[in-house]
Amino acid sequence: LLATGARDGAVKLWRVVQGDEGDVRLEEAYKFQPNSTVGGKAEAVTAVAFAPKPVPLADSKGREAILALGTESGRIEIWAVHILEGIAAGVRLLLSLPDSCCHADTVKGLAWRPYSGAGAEGRSSLRLTLASCGMDHGVRILEITVPH
């Protein structure tokens, strides 16, 4: 799965498909807009990053990939992307970070700290670390608790 963000506020999730002749192409799997709006319109998405590993769902029906979005106004949102049989089947907003944890200007980059996933079994939440940088010359290191 690959994610892209755009100036029109669209977040697109793509899947990589290999053709019969070995060619590789991208197919749009899902499209949504961030929760953040400016003047009633979806805000431009300037950075996207998937957490290193999808989280298994308790009901064993697929997994959820954790996706961070950064916007032009400096906001950061955390989304869960439901993956069923390798295809994005839906999204849900997990967390919209408070202004005190966001940037004063455009988010330019997001990166998750790698994790092994060891010890996550049997827990009702997963703790992840997200780094962000912005046009405000700030860097934020955030610990995010994701329910699963």
Image (cartoon, helix red, strand yellow):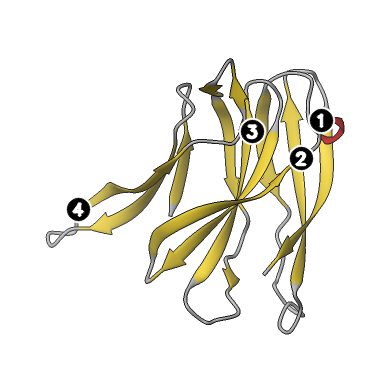
Front: mark 3 or 2: 2
**Chain-order first, disc 1 or disc 4:** 4
Choose the circle earlier in sequence order: 3 or 4.
Answer: 4
Q: CA distance from mark 3 to mark 1?
A: 12 Å
Q: In the depicted view, which residue is nearer to us: 94 or 131? A: 94
Q: Residues within 10 Å of mark 1 (few under 14, many from 20)?
A: few
Q: Amino acid at mark 3?
A: Gly
Q: Secondary structure at mark 3?
A: strand
Question: Residue 74, image x and y in percent?
Answer: 71, 25
Which residue lies under the disc numbered 1? 99
Q: Position of residue 36 (x, y in %)?
A: 62, 30
CA distance separating discs 3 and 4: 32 Å
Say which residue label 3 marks.
Answer: 70
The residue identified by callout 2 is 97
Q: Which residue is mark 4?
A: 23
For the point 43% across and 55% down, the residue is: 1
| Front of the two marks 2 and 4 | 2
Q: Amino acid at mark 4?
A: Asp
Up-down relation of residue 105 to residue 17 (above or below): above
Instruction: Please tell me how crowded label 3 is: few (under 14), some (14-19), or many (20+) other residues with Cα within 10 Å.
Output: many
Look at label 2 and name its amino acid: Leu
Secondary structure beneath dot 4 equals loop
